[in-house]
Image: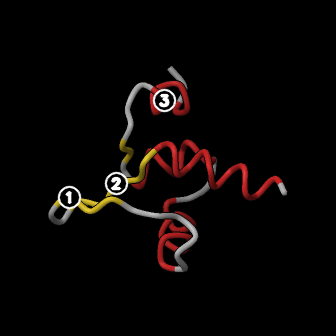
Amino acid sequence: MQAKEKAQSRRLLTVKEAAGFLSVSPRTIASLKKSGQLPQVKLRRAVRFDIKDLEAFILRCKK
């Protein structure tokens, strides 16, 4: 199963999964998070990314 197909079966993704979904490196995900371009969900110490936020990011980049 490809990263995007696997990711779409779940709502919250890890940094590595989000990177696979966007076809970028985990370092790029960290940069986008730090700059505020990509919202995060904090669950105690764990950082997750909502798949809807990733899809919205893709749409913003298309414009």
Q: Which residue is mark 1?
A: 43
CB contact under 8 Å: marks 3 and 2: no
Q: Position of residue 9 (x, y in %)?
A: 42, 25
Q: Residue at x 38, y 31 (%)?
A: 10
Q: Which residue is mark 3?
A: 8
Q: Position of residue 5 (x, y in %)?
A: 53, 25
Bin the neighbour count of mark 1 within 10 Å (Cα to Cα): few under 14, some 14-19, many 20 and up: few
- The CA span between labels 1 and 3 is 20 Å
Helix, strand or loop at mark 3: helix
Q: Position of residue 12 (x, y in %)?
A: 36, 43
Bin the neighbour count of mark 3 within 10 Å (Cα to Cα): few under 14, some 14-19, many 20 and up: few
- The CA span between labels 2 and 1 is 8 Å
CB contact under 8 Å: marks 2 and 1: yes
Q: Is residue 41 left or right of residue 3?
A: left
Q: Residue at x 62, y 50 (%)?
A: 56
Helix, strand or loop at mark 1: strand
The residue type indicated by label 2 comes to: Arg
Q: Which residue is mark 2?
A: 48
Q: Is residue 45 left or right of residue 31?
A: left
